Image (spheres, rainbow, N blue to C red):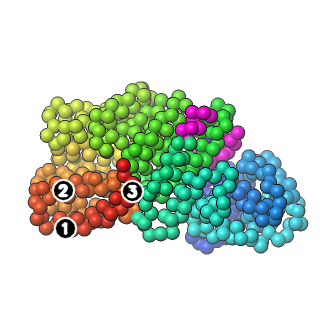
Amino acid sequence: MSGRQHRETEIARRIRAKGLAAGRTNAQIAEEIHETCGPQFGTTKVKSHRLSYGIALADVIEQVRALFEQDKKAPPGIGETLLSAYESGLKRPGPEYLHYLCAVYRVEPATLGFDGPCICGGHGHQRPPLAVTHWETTARMGSSRELIMQSHDAEAPSEGISEDENILRRTLLTLLSTEPGKAKLDGPVLGAIEGIRRRMDETLVCASVSPAMLDQWEEATLSFGRQYTTTAPLRLLCDVLLELSSVRAAMNRRQPIDLQERLCRMAAQLSGLSGMIMINLGDHRLARSFFRTGRTAADETGDRALRAWVTAREALVPLYYGDAREALNLAKKSRDLAGQTPCAAQAMAPVVEARALAMLTGTDSSKEVVDQAKRALARARNAFSHIRGTEREDMAFGYTERQLYFYQGDVLTKLGQTLEAEVVLDQALDKYQDHILDQTLIRLDQAQCRLIEGDLDEAMTIGIKALNLLGSDFRTDFIMRPAVALEQAVAERDPNHPLLPVYREQLRPTISLAEGTGSA
């Protein structure tokens, strides 16, 4: 998405949020969006109404089609390209399409910026069909995606909608309507996840979407990267995979080379992000599969930085699941792919190297290994200073300063360099405000430092606080491993420590949910 489009969307999103909080109608919100964004971005009235609902072009098209079906008419020929032309002012809808656009937004033609009557003479649009009422209710709850899933859930699967997508939609609805932590990564969900990933592989090896649609998908991809720090893993995974499925459908037929490259880039990013989420959910088998898919897509772009990013992220799978040597090899491969290109992987790869070295030797590391790991960290800090500003603010597709502090502290902890580690970990925790998983891991590293120094009371106190702050949606196998390791290490030193029962009480729900995450 261009910078102008991104700013337009961000401003409209803020106006919509404030308007909904104040109880204003969508028509009132649309008017304010038009008044604010029109002079600066040329935002038309009809586009302002879509932005007031916080939905995509595809959502409007589906509503128009549903209204045609309700009126027992043949499916309309309107698509996203035509609707985008209406919104940009390049074309004007005819009387029939104008009528149905008015019905969708529940306004009259003039309110959408079009003069002249529609097929009903310009009357009757205020009476909302059932689907529109349902849509507005959902929009006021703050998620247009919920509407899409509920509408598909109520109907038989339509052409182009796979059963895998419907399973993910039902899972997301369950997550939205039940208590946190109730939904599980069970067999059908895992099958749907693998099905979408497999079809993306098939499309990549065998394979015209509008530029406006690509802009929206790219915006959604970046948005998912931002949500990675704050949204429960399974909830975010459903959203990411539904977007990946849409991108796959667009790639089913070869696009012009420039559009195909953009689609491949999104496929690589969404697949890589899915792999990252699968690590958090504790399924390293599916994580590896997604990273493999991401590599295939990234290779199609020829972008060294993107290929290096996918490989560096993939290195975290063996790093967290027991094969430090493989993690070391993948990190070196990522570094070679990046070459001299300033990018996130240039900083990420040497940090993974240092963490792998620390895991191979542990707290009894020789001075040579400690020095080798510290040199890798120095390379990471130097590379970080050359990363572009936008990448330094993106925790998913870039590399941030707080991540650099956190992983430096983790390396020093594993090397037994507790004095340095505690200073760096304190700095890292101070920089984290929203990423609950990393906050928890930082606190568990702090507890390990205290344990190494022999302060069992403080180690247990820090561990209890860390788990107490962790919501049930985030209690996955990924977090359980270091949390249980701390409990076992303390029990080995003092099986009767008075704080162990309290810590175990905090662990119990973690263990219960982790057993249901489908960890491989």
Reading the chain from its start, which is encountered first: label 2 or label 1?
2
Q: CA distance from mark 3 to mark 2?
A: 22 Å
**Residue at image x 48%, y 55%?**
189
Q: Quadrant for residue 477, please give it.
A: bottom left
Q: How many numbered marks have been drawn onto this rendered protein structure?
A: 3
Secondary structure at badge 3 equals loop
Q: Quadrant for residue 62, please give it.
A: bottom right
Q: Which residue is mark 2?
A: 488
Image location (x, y in percent) of residue 137: 63, 70
Q: CA distance from mark 2 to mark 1?
A: 12 Å
Q: Which residues are magenta?
A: 200-221
**Disc 3 packing (10 Å; few <14; some 14–19; many ≥20):** many
Q: Which residue is mark 3?
A: 517
**Disc 1 packing (10 Å; few <14; some 14–19; many ≥20):** few
Closer to us: 234 or 106: 234
**Residue at image x 88%, y 62%?**
119
**Disc 2 packing (10 Å; few <14; some 14–19; many ≥20):** some
Tell me: 332 left or right of 289: left
**Residue at image x 30%, y 50%?**
428
Question: Of circles 3 and 1, which is in front?
Answer: 3
Q: Which residue is mark 1?
A: 501
Tell me: 446 left or right of 438: left
